[in-house]
Image (cartoon, rainbow, N blue to C red):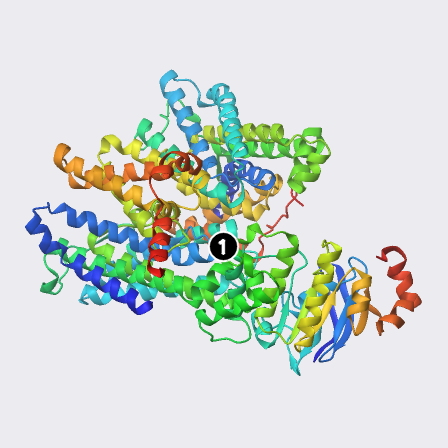
C-alpha cells in the first residue's frame, strides 16, 4: 500500500517536473509556471498546517511564525554569507521545527491549553517571533535577496522555483499521506476526538502531538525558505501578515481537514481564485469573498469539499470537462482564469444541499461509490 | 528617572484605552462565549467614522458619538443576532469572526484607502496639549481616555452587579440552561449585550481617532495587546480588564522608553503567553463567570 | 496485584480521597461501592493516571504507577470504562476499537491485525453488526458495550468498570453481567463500581465500601452488607 503510494507520488512528481518543457511545446505563457509555483507553495503550507491541526484538532493560528522563521533563515543566510541557498532550505525547516518543538514542549503538557486558548497562544507566538526577528535580523529595513546561484539543470529562475516548489509540495503531501495512514495518524485522530480517552487507551499523546507539530513546522519552514527567494525582498510586515494563517486555515477548512488531500484541494482552489481576481479592481470583492467563504464553509459545509467531491465525483468531473471544452473552443482568455471558472462551476455543484442533490441529480447520475460497488460485485461473479 | 516616571504615567493613561476595548471583548467572551475578533474591526470602523465626521463637518470628533453610539449599538446587535441565530460560540466564533475581520478590513481599505489618516490639529487642538504636574506632562486626550475608561468599567460593573438585567447576564455566564429554566431570556439579553459591545467600540473608536494615526490594518496592533489584557484581567471581569489594561500599558511604555519601541510588542505578547501558560484564569480571576 | 496505599486527593480545598488503602488480588472481582461523591470515580481516575494523587502510593504488579502518564499505565495492563461513554465521535464503531487494539498492551501489532482483533472484540460484545456504523448511531446500552470492547481490546490484566450498568434496562443488565463473568473467567481481574446493589453483591468476590473519601468497610458481600456503618452511610437511602 505504502510502496504503491510512493510510486504514485514519484510518477506524479516526474510528470509534473517535466511540465516546464511541455509548456514550451504547448505554447502556454510563462506566468503559468509562477502560478503553479504559488499553488505548490500554498499546498505545502496548508498541508503542513493540517498535519497538526486537521489530524489532532489542535487549532494553530500561528503557522505564519514557522513559515516566517523559514523565510528569514534563508533570507538572512543568503544575504549575509556565501552559503548556497539550496543548503539553507533544510536548515530553514529544521529551525522552524525546533521553534515548534520548543513551543510544543511547554504547551502540550498543559491540558487546559486546548481549543481557543491554544489558538490564541500560537497567534501570540507568531507576534513574538516577528518582534524578535524585527529586532535581531531585520532592523526595520527588510532584507534584499536578489539573484541566487543554483545548479543549471533546474532551468531558468521560474522553472527552478517551479521544480523546487513541486518537490517541497510533494514531500509535504507525501508526509501527510504517510501520517494519515500510520499509527501516528490513527493516534492523532483519537486525540482529535477525545484526548483523555485516547491517552487512557494507550496512545502516547504528548509524544504524538510533538511529532505532529515537529513535522508540521518543519515543512512550513521548508516552504518558507524557498519562498524567501521567490519574494526576493522580505520584511517583517509582509512575511508575518495575518493572511498566511488566514489562508492556510481557509484552504484546509475548504478542502477538508480529515483527509490528506483536503488542504491540497483547498489550496489550489483559493490560490486560483485569488490569482484570477487579483486585478486591483476586484480587490474588495476578492477579500470579501475570501472572508465570506470562510464563514460560509464553517456554517454550511464544515466537513469540507473533499467529502462532497468523493460522493459527487462523476458529475463533478463531467461538469469540469464540459466547462473546459466550452471555454477552450468558444471563449478563450487566460488559462488560469479558465481554470478558476471551471472550479467555480464544480464548487457550485458541490454546494448543492444533499437533499436537493439526491432528488434531482442523484437520480440520473450514479454515485462513484455505487459504480465502484457494481464493478466489485461484477468481478466477484 | 524623569523619563521613567513620564513613561509610567503615559503608560497608565493609555492603559485606559486598552481597558475600554477589552471590556467589550471580555464580556462577549465571558458571558456569550463569543471570541469576537470583529470587535477590533468595529472599533476601527468607529474611529474612521469619527474621523470622517470631523473632517467633513469640522466639528469636534466627540460630537460624532451622537451618531456612532446609536449606530454601533445597532451594528453590534445585528452581529450578535447573527451569532445567536447560527449558534456561533467558542472556537467556531474565533474562525467566523476571523472571516468578518478580513471583510471589515477590506471594506475600510476600500473606503479610506491604505493611506495614513490623522485628524488635523485645527479640529483637535487639544491633541497636543497637556496637563502639567511639575515636570511631567499628561496629554489631554490620554487623560480623557483614562477617565472614560474608569467611567465605562465602573458603569459596567454596577450594571452587572446591581441591576436585574446585569444579574441575569451573569447567571447566563454561569449556567445557560439553569438560567433559562429560571426564566432568563437568553436571546434578548444576548442582543442587548451585542449592542453594548457596539457602544464600547464606538467610545474606544472616538479616542483612537484622536490619539492615533489611522490605517486599515491598524487593528493588528491591538489584537495581541487586547487579548493579553483580557486574559490577564480574567474572562468576563470588567474591572480586571481595566486593571490589566493599565499593567500592559505601563509594560509597553516602559519597554519603549528603556529598550526601544521595537521591543514593545515582544513584551506584550510574551506577557500574553506567560498568562496563558501559568495563569489562564487571569490575575484578577473571573468575576462574571465564576 | 494492585495496592493503593493511603491515597489522598485534594481538589482545591476539597478532600476527595482522605487516605484510601485498598488491595486487589489477582483473579478477584472487587465491587467498589459508596454513595454519590464518596470518591469512587476519583479513585479510578487516580489509578489510571488521569489525575495524580496529592499523597500516597499506588503499586501495580510491584511497580509504583502514581504519577505515570495514563498511556504507560494502560500499557502495564490497566484499562477502564467511563461512566458516561466517551466514544471517538468521528470514527466508526470498529475504528474505535481498533485504536485501543493498536495502542494497548500488545504494542507493535500491524493495523491489519488491529482491525482483525477489533472485529473479534465486537463479536465478543455482540456489536459486530454495527462495526461499520458511525458511533453516533449507537444507543446508550450499545455505547456502554463499546466502552467495554475498547477497554478489553487493550488486553488489560486489570479492568476498572465505572458504572457500566447505570441506565440500562433489566435484560440489558443481565446481558452485561454475563459478559463481565465471561471476561473474568478469561483471566482478567475486575474492579467494578456500581450503584445497583443486586448486581454488585452477586458479581463480586469481595466488596469495598467508600464514604467521604474513606474505606469504611470491606470483605465478603454478605458480611459487608450487614455492617452497621455501611447501612448507616449508604444502604438506608440508596438500596436498589
Residue plotted at (20% across, 63% down): A85
Q: Nearer the viewer, residue B2 or C215?
A: C215
Q: Quadrant of residue B289?
A: top right
Q: Point out the image quarter for the N terminus of chain C.
A: bottom right
Describe the element under mark 1 as helix, strand or loop.
Answer: helix
Residue plotted at (28% across, 36% down): A345
Residue plotted at (69% across, 31% down): B184
C53 lies left or right of B83: right
- Residue A135 visible within the image: no
Q: How many marks?
A: 1
| Residue C171: image location, x then y, percent | 73, 57
- Residue A56 visible within the image: yes
Residue plotted at (34% across, 30% down): B117
| Residue A378: image location, x then y, percent | 34, 56
Q: Which residue is mark 1?
A: B273
| Residue C238: image location, x then y, percent | 85, 56
| Residue C212: image location, x then y, percent | 81, 62
Q: Point out the image quarter for the C terminus of chain C.
A: bottom right
C28 lies left or right of A183: right
Amino acid at each position: 500500500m505504502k510502496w504503491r503510494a510512493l510510486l504514485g507520488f514519484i510518477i506524479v512528481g516526474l510528470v509534473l517536473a517535466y511540465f516546464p518543457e511541455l509548456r514550451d511545446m504547448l505554447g502556454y505563457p510563462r506566468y503559468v509556471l509562477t502560478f503553479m509555483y504559488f499553488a505548490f507553495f500554498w499546498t505545502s503550507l496548508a498541508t503542513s498546517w493540517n498535519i497538526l491541526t486537521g489530524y489532532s484538532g489542535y487549532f494553530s493560528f500561528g503557522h505564519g511564525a514557522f513559515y516566517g522563521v523559514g523565510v528569514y533563515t534563508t533570507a538572512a543566510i543568503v544575504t549575509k554569507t556565501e552559503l548556497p541557498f539550496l543548503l539553507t532550505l533544510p536548515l530553514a525547516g529544521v529551525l522552524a521545527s525546533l521553534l515548534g518543538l520548543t513551543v510544543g514542549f511547554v504547551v502540550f503538557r498543559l491540558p487546559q491549553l486546548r481549543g481557543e486558548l491554544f489558538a490564541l497562544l500560537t497567534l501570540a507566538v507568531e507576534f513574538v517571533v516577528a518582534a524578535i526577528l524585527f529586532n535581531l535580523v531585520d532592523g526595520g529595513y527588510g532584507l534584499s535577496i536578489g539573484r541566487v546561484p543554483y545548479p543549471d539543470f533546474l532551468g531558468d529562475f521560474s522553472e527552478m522555483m517551479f521544480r523546487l516548489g513541486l518537490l517541497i509540495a510533494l514531500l509535504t503531501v507525501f508526509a501527510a499521506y504517510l501520517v494519515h495512514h500510520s499509527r501516528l495518524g490513527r493516534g492523532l485522530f483519537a486525540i482529535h476526538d477525545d484526548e483523555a480517552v485516547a491517552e487512557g487507551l494507550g496512545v502516547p499523546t504528548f509524544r504524538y502531538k510533538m511529532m505532529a507539530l515537529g513535522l508540521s513546522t518543519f515543512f512550513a519552514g521548508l516552504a518558507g525558505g524557498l519562498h524567501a527567494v521567490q519574494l526576493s525582498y522580505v520584511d517583517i510586515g509582509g512575511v508575518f501578515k495575518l493572511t498566511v494563517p488566514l489562508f492556510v486555515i481557509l484552504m484546509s477548512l475548504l478542502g477538508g481537514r480529515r483527509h490528506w488531500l483536503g488542504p491540497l484541494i483547498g489550496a489550489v482552489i483559493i490560490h486560483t481564485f485569488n490569482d484570477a481576481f487579483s486585478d486591483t479592481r476586484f480587490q474588495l470583492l476578492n477579500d470579501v469573498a475570501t472572508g465570506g467563504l470562510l464563514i460560509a464553509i464553517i456554517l454550511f459545509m464544515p466537513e469540507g469539499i473533499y467529502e462532497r467531491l468523493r460522493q459527487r465525483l462523476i458529475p463533478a468531473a463531467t461538469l469540469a470537462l464540459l466547462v473546459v471544452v466550452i471555454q477552450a473552443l468558444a471563449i478563450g482568455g487566460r488559462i488560469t482564469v479558465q481554470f478558476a471558472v471551471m472550479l467555480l462551476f464544480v464548487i457550485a455543484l458541490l454546494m448543492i444541499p444533499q437533499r436537493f442533490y439526491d432528488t434531482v441529480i442523484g437520480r440520473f447520475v450514479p454515485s462513484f461509490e455505487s459504480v465502484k460497488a457494481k464493478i466489485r460485485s461484477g468481478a466477484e461473479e | 528617572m524623569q523619563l521613567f516616571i513620564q513613561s509610567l504615567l503615559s503608560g497608565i493613561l493609555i492603559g485606559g484605552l486598552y481597558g475600554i476595548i477589552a471590556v467589550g471583548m471580555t464580556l462577549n467572551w465571558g458571558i456569550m462565549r463569543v471570541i469576537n475578533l470583529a470587535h477590533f474591526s468595529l472599533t476601527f470602523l468607529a474611529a474612521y467614522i469619527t474621523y470622517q465626521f470631523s473632517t467633513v463637518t469640522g466639528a469636534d470628533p466627540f460630537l460624532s458619538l451622537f451618531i456612532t453610539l446609536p449606530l454601533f449599538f445597532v451594528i453590534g446587535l445585528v452581529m450578535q443576532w447573527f451569532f445567536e441565530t447560527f449558534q456561533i460560540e467558542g472556537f467556531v466564533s474565533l474562525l467566523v469572526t476571523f472571516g468578518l475581520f478580513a471583510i471589515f478590513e477590506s471594506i475600510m481599505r476600500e473606503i479610506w484607502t491604505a493611506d495614513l489618516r490623522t485628524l488635523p490639529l485645527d479640529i483637535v487642538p487639544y491633541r497636543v496639549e497637556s496637563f502639567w504636574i511639575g515636570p511631567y506632562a499628561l496629554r489631554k486626550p490620554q487623560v480623557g481616555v483614562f477617565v472614560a475608561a474608569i467611567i465605562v468599567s465602573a458603569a459596567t460593573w454596577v450594571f452587572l452587579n446591581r441591576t436585574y438585567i446585569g444579574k441575569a447576564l451573569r447567571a447566563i455566564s454561569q449556567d445557560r440552561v439553569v438560567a433559562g429554566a429560571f426564566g432568563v431570556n437568553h436571546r434578548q439579553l444576548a442582543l442587548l449585550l451585542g449592542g453594548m459591545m457596539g457602544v464600547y467600540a464606538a467610545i474606544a473608536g472616538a479616542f483612537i481617532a484622536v490619539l492615533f494615526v489611522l490605517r486599515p490594518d491598524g487593528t493588528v496592533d491591538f489584537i495581541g495587546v487586547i487579548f493579553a489584557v483580557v486574559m490577564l484581567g480574567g474572562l468576563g471581569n470588567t474591572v480586571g480588564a481595566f486593571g490589566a489594561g493599565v499593567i500592559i500599558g505601563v509594560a509597553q511604555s516602559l519597554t519603549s522608553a528603556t529598550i526601544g519601541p521595537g521591543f514593545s510588542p515582544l513584551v506584550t505578547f510574551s506577557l500574553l503567553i506567560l498568562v496563558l501558560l501559568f495563569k489562564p484564569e487571569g490575575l484578577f480571576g473571573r468575576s462574571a463567570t465564576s | 496485584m494492585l495496592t493503593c496505599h493511603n491515597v489522598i486527593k485534594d481538589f482545591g480545598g476539597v478532600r476527595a480521597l482522605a487516605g484510601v488503602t485498598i488491595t486487589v488480588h489477582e483473579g478477584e472481582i472487587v465491587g467498589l461501592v459508596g454513595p454519590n461523591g464518596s470518591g469512587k470515580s476519583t479513585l479510578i481516575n487516580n489509578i489510571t493516571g488521569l489525575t495524580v494523587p496529592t499523597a500516597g502510593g499506588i503499586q501495580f504488579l510491584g511497580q509504583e504507577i502514581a504519577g505515570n502518564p495514563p498511556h504507560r499505565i494502560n500499557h502495564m495492563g490497566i484499562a477502564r470504562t467511563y461512566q458516561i461513554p466517551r466514544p471517538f465521535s468521528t470514527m466508526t464503531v470498529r475504528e474505535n476499537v481498533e485504536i485501543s487494539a493498536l495502542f494497548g498492551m500488545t504494542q507493535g501489532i500491524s493495523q491489519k491485525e488491529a482491525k482483525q482483533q477489533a472485529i473479534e472484540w465486537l463479536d465478543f460484545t455482540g456489536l459486530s453488526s454495527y462495526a461499520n456504523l458511525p458511533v453516533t448511531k449507537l444507543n446508550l446500552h450499545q455505547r456502554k458495550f463499546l466502552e467495554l470492547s475498547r477497554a478489553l481490546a487493550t488486553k488489560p490484566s486489570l479492568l476498572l468498570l465505572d458504572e457500566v450498568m447505570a441506565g440500562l434496562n433489566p435484560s440489558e443488565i443481565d446481558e452485561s453481567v454475563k459478559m463481565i463473568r465471561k471476561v473474568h473467567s478469561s483471566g482478567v481481574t475486575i474492579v467494578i463500581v456500581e450503584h445497583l446493589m443486586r448486581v454488585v453483591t452477586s458479581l463480586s468476590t469481595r466488596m469495598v465500601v467508600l464514604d467521604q473519601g474513606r474505606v469504611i468497610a470491606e470483605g465478603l458481600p454478605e458480611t459487608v452488607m450487614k455492617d452497621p456503618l455501611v447501612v448507616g452511610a449508604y444502604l438506608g437511602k440508596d438500596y436498589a
